[in-house]
Image (cartoon, grey):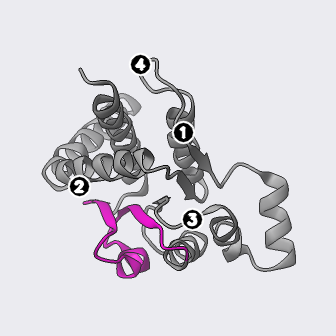
Amino acid sequence: MDLTEHAKQSFNHSIQTGMESLPVLVQPLVNTAELIVGRLLEGGKVLSCGSGAEAAIAQLFATHMLNRFDRERPGLPALSLAVDAATLTSIADDYDYDEVFAKQVRALGHPGDLLVAITTGGNDGTVNAAVEAAHEREMFTIAFTGKDGGRAASLLREVDIELRVPSDNDARIRETHLLGIHCLCDLIDKQLLGS
């Protein structure tokens, strides 16, 4: 296969994953947007986390919330737990790497706040520890997962929401997570700002 055909195949696989995700993710995305707006209007905030490439998606989500997505609006209280290198390395050095997000959730999270946890396979120790910490703090959890949901899926409570991409390919899962994050930001803005 030449490179042009290979590139076309990547696009087609991404489009196919998106199409397969559509019936699975649309209603959970709407439910998530409604939950987030409800919690924000009650004075809550959103913490987000993910490791590796998922950290970048978590950071992008927090940026879109705090600054803006598509339209001008006041900033919304959101924070990515994956961006402070000094805090992350201090926690990893003094305690355990799996605690890098959980310790921040315990310090910053309050009852009624939300954790947006992003993990392709659901078995990331740092993300799963953050989910457990969020439950300790009586927070809601929104988990973006893929594959079979992994351990993250088993940690979720009835009030939590899982957005599981029906794929085993990490790149396709991340691409769909990014689309889901963009859709979520748009749905939040639509509720707050109208059409």
Q: Is residue 89 above or below residue 33?
A: below
Expressed as whole percent of the image width and height from the top left, the position of residue 95 reads 80, 80
Residue 1 seen by the camera? no
Residue type pointed to by label 1: Leu
Residue type pointed to by label 4: Arg
Expressed as whole percent of the image width and height from the top left, the position of residue 164 reads 30, 61
Residue holding disc 2: 28
Q: Is residue 159 above or below residue 80?
A: below
Residue type pointed to by label 2: Pro
Residue 57 seen by the camera? yes
Residue holding disc 3: 110
Question: 19 or 55, which is in the foreground?
Answer: 55
Residue type pointed to by label 3: His
Outermost residue, front direction? Answer: 42
Q: Is residue 79 above or below residue 92?
A: above
The quadrant where residue 188 appears:
top left
Secondary structure beneath label 2: helix
Comes first in the chain, label 1 or label 2: 2
Residue 33 is labelled as none
Quadrant into which the N terminus falls: top left
- The residues tagged by marks 3 and 2 sit, at their Cα atoms, a distance apart of 23 Å
Query: Which residue shows up at 51% across the image and 67% down it?
Result: 111
Q: Nearer the viewer, mark 4 or mark 1?
A: 4
Badge 1: residue crowd in 10 Å (few <14, some 14–19, many ≥20): some
Residue holding disc 1: 60
Comes first in the chain, label 2 or label 4: 2
Question: 102 or 147, which is in the foreground?
Answer: 102
Range drawn in magenta: 137-166
- The residues tagged by marks 1 and 2 sit, at their Cα atoms, a distance apart of 20 Å
Query: Which residue shows up at 31% across the image and 73% down it?
Result: 148
Residue holding disc 4: 71
Quick check: 22 left or right of 163?
left
